[in-house]
Image (tube, rainbow, N blue to C red):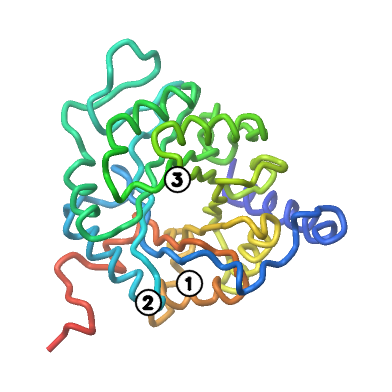
Amino acid sequence: MTTIDRRLRIAATLGLAALCLAACHPDARPATQASRPQLGAGFRWSVYGPKYNPGPEYWARVGREMAARFPGATPEAIWIVSRVKGEGTVLNFPAPAGMPGIEGTAEDGNEAALALFDQLGFRVWLQVEPSFVPVEPLIHVVLERYAHHRCVVGFGIDVEWYRSFNPDEGQPVTDAEANAWLAAVRTHDPSYRLFLKHFEWGKMPPTAREGLLFVDDSQIFPSLDAMVEEFAEWAARFAPAPVAFQFGYQTDRPWWSTLADPPGEIGRRILAVAPNTAALFWVDFSVLDVFPPGARPASEAP
């Protein structure tokens, strides 16, 4: 599917949503300012996103700098611990033996960063790209290894890679699946939550809301105004349930690169139209450019 096809499909979907949002969907009501969750702000991390990995201290700095742009925000991260590989998934830590479709690596790529995030009071979501691997066993593999970390607040599933090879697709999640996955996550900690991520609201469960966070990772926008309009539709669709947004993709660089402070300006525009926003994440595909390694924040400059 071309990027043009994807953008046209998004536009068509949102056009239909706008027509029926208020009249046809009882949950599609604006959230009030009082219902805004405690905001988190930070970044998305994966082994394949940045050109290289500067190390845990760098990611901690990015989280703090992103959160500092929004008064009262807590540093928060989407930390991706598996990536799709054919019909299976590859964990970035040693995988248990005897689990079909699940591969691992010789070394643990997460422990040092999560230990640092524990010390700094971060909130971290551990995300997977399941492909055709059953989700519940994958939940247990990940959380049995990392649930001891205080920074971990929940588990995430990129629905674009749920029973799919195509990042523009993914099988829609049913209410029963969402509830079963949340229950599996909460066997490790009853306070944990589950996020589901896609750019089409039709891929999300129809009515399940308790314990869920709905993450929009849409991109290929012609302008900041277009992004804000689409993100506002996403927030209204799920209100009063919490939502979150990923942004900073290279496909949107032609316009966000003209902003004086892309993370701050985009985030504030989103917050102005999406009162149920729980988190804002700058993506790792451009993070090294926007938060250069070794650079000192302006507030610390001599």
Question: Between marks 3 and 1, how big is the CA–CA gap?
Answer: 27 Å
The answer to which of marks 2 and 1 sits earlier in the sequence is: 2
Callout 1: helix, strand or loop?
A: helix
Q: Quadrant of the C terminus?
A: bottom left
Q: Nearer the viewer, mark 3 or mark 1?
A: 3
Q: In the rendered image, which residue does mark 3 sit on?
A: 191
Residue plotted at (50% across, 76% down) = 268
Question: Between marks 2 and 3, how big is the CA–CA gap?
Answer: 27 Å
Give, as a three-letter code, the residue at label 1.
Gly
Left or right for 239, reference 60: right
Residue plotted at (17% across, 26% down) = 106
Callout 3: helix, strand or loop?
A: loop
Q: Position of residue 218 (x, y in %)?
A: 55, 55
The answer to which of marks 2 and 3 sits earlier in the sequence is: 2
For label 3, count other residues whose C-alpha is less than 10 Å away and answer few (under 14), some (14-19) or many (20+).
Answer: few
* Corner quadrant of residue 72: bottom left
* Corner quadrant of residue 144: top left
Q: In the rendered image, which residue does mark 2 sit on?
A: 69
The answer to which of marks 3 and 1 sits earlier in the sequence is: 3
Left or right for 170, reference 263: right
Residue plotted at (48% across, 30% down) = 184
Pointers 2 and 1 in contact (C-beta within 8 Å): yes
